[in-house]
Amino acid sequence: MGRFVYWMNVSLDLRIEATAGENGGGSWLRIGEALHREFNARARALSLGVEGRVIYEVMERYWPAARHDESLSDVLREYGEIWTDMPKVLVSRTRRSADHHTRVVGGDDAIAQLAALRASTEGDIGVGGANLATQLLEAHLLDELMLFTHPVVLGAGRPLFDRLAEPLQLDLLEQATYEDDVTLHRYAVRGAQPMG
């Protein structure tokens, strides 16, 4: 059985964007080489990635070309290789095809298709996108949060989840501190559907 892991960079007030359209590239993020190496190691350990359309389209515009861009650092080229080669699922109502080892699921039964994917996959399944993560949470399919918290309070912007029906109960699995005071907190989500 797989486990859905929502992996995100967040501010201390659990914002993922200060302004619309940042798409993971805000100037408030403190991502140095050592932290990116940690990202690479964790991404390499995923069985596959599941991404919403917005985040997928941001990633596909940059990372496939980045893996061959000699002007970039080796850690960025490495991540480009990891993302491009990783099996992925794009969740979209509007797209019908995608490249880079990606299959597309969509329609009214997308969450049911993802539940079946979780049941038939071994290992961790990375989740990208707040809308998708919110839907998985509401369906009790989100197993874990992996939050890289940057020491900044944004005060406004897009939250980690689009909505919460009730307080989200978590259990701490791991914590670590990286360069520039960025911290990792991994949490198990209470109430996720049992695996099996």
Image (cartoon, rainbow, N blue to C red):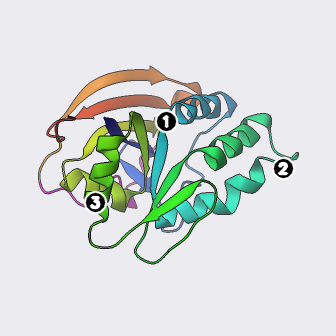
Q: What secondary structure is marked by label 3?
A: helix
Q: What secondary structure is marked by label 1?
A: loop
Q: Nearer the viewer, residue 163 or 155?
A: 163
Gap between marks 3 and 1 measured at Cα: 20 Å
Look at the image and say whether residue 41 sits in the magenta stretch. no
Q: Which residues are magenta?
A: 152-165
Q: What secondary structure is marked by label 2?
A: loop
Q: Quadrant of residue 70?
A: top right
Q: In this rendering, is residue 175 above or below 102? A: above
Q: In this rendering, is residue 116 above or below 171? A: below
Cβ atoms at labels 2 and 1 below 8 Å apart: no
Look at the image and say whether residue 158 sits in the magenta stretch. yes
Q: Main secondary structure of the magenta part?
A: loop
Residue 127, x across and y down, in percent: 41, 48
Q: Which residue is mark 2?
A: 69
Q: Quadrant of residue 98?
A: bottom right
Q: Which residue is mark 1?
A: 46
Please tell me how many numbered marks the rendered image carries: 3
Check disc 2 and give the amino acid type.
Answer: Asp
Q: Earlier in the sequence, mark 3 or mark 2?
A: 2
